Each structure stands twice: as C-alpha cells, then as structure tokens.
Image (spheres, rainbow, N blue to C red):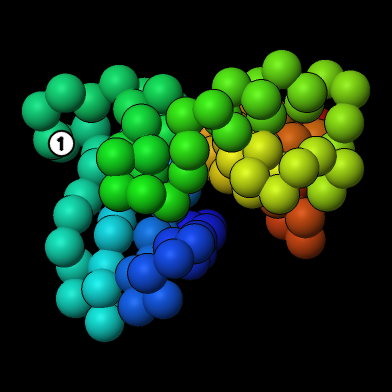
Amino acid sequence: MPHLLRHPTARKRTATYGFDRAVGFFVNIERKDMLIAEYDRLRPGYDELNGALRFLVEHGFLQAADIDEAVRLSPVLLPEEMEPGAGRAAEVIENLRRAADPDPELAPAGAVPDEEES
C-alpha cells in the first residue's frame, strides 16, 4: 500500500512511496497531479531503501540530518516523540521497512496476515 507525503513548503507537491515486489522501493513525485520524478529499481542508480530516502532528500521532502537523527533515536523513541523533522523521517523509514518486510508482525496496521497451512 503506497503512502502519501506532502512537501513541507511546496504545497502542490506530493510524494507517493512504498515497496512493490516488481519495482522494489519506489517514490513518485507529483506536482498538481502530474508525475515529475520517479525512483524505483527500473531506474539507473537504484540503491534500495537508502536510495529512496536520498531521492526524497533531493526533492526536498526530507532533510538528511533528520534521517540521521531518526535512525539514531528510533531504538529509544517513537516518531511522535522526536523533533518534527526527525519524526517525519522516522515515519517514512518505518513505512518503507514495513512495506518491504513479509513478516506479519511488521505488516501495516489493519493488514491481515496469511494463515499458515496445516
């Protein structure tokens, strides 16, 4: 399930991001409902989760320092307990990790895990 991230200053820009088995981690940047930039494994320079985060930094949706802070604080704080920029970055990282992890314990809220066959 893709997630929506609004640009912090450019009100008409949004990023849709997530994970898809065919294209891996992906980010689509839109302005006024027009696709203006894409990141996925079909593009040159694909670098998994780190590349998706760098792509969001390049387009101004996140700050590199906030990502570093989120990674440092995530083991001890929830995103809502962090400074706003770091909390925003932590939430994006968590969403991407959960989207890519087939472990039902890490599935997005509301997802129904597959039942094991007996």
Picture quadrant of residue 41: top left
Image mark count: 1
Q: Which residue is mark 1?
A: 42
Q: Is 60 left, or right, of 90 in this rendering? A: left
- Residue 73 visible in this rendered orientation of the protein: yes
- What's the residue at 59%, 33% (across, down)? 66
Q: Is 47 left, or right, of 105 in this rendering? A: left
Picture quadrant of residue 65: top right
Residue 38 in the image, given as x and y percentages of width and height: 21, 50
Picture quadrant of residue 82: top right
Residue 30 in the image, given as x and y percentages of width and height: 27, 68
The residue nearer to you, when weighing 32 against 109, is: 32
The residue nearer to you, when weighing 3 against 77, is: 77
Residue 56 in the image, given as x and y percentages of width and height: 38, 43
The residue nearer to you, when weighing 105 against 11, is: 11
- What's the residue at 87%, 31% (across, down)? 77
- What's the residue at 16%, 23% (across, down)? 45
Amino acid at the residue labelled 1: Leu
Q: Is residue 111 above or below residue 88?
A: below
Q: At numbered mark 1, what does the secondary structure look like: helix, strand or loop?
A: loop
**Quadrant of the image for the C terminus?**
top right
Q: Is residue 8 above or below residue 77?
A: below
Q: Residue furthest left?
A: 44
- What's the residue at 48%, 38% (across, down)? 63
Few, some or many C-alpha atoms within 10 Å of disc 1 (few <14, some 14-19, many ≥20)? Answer: few
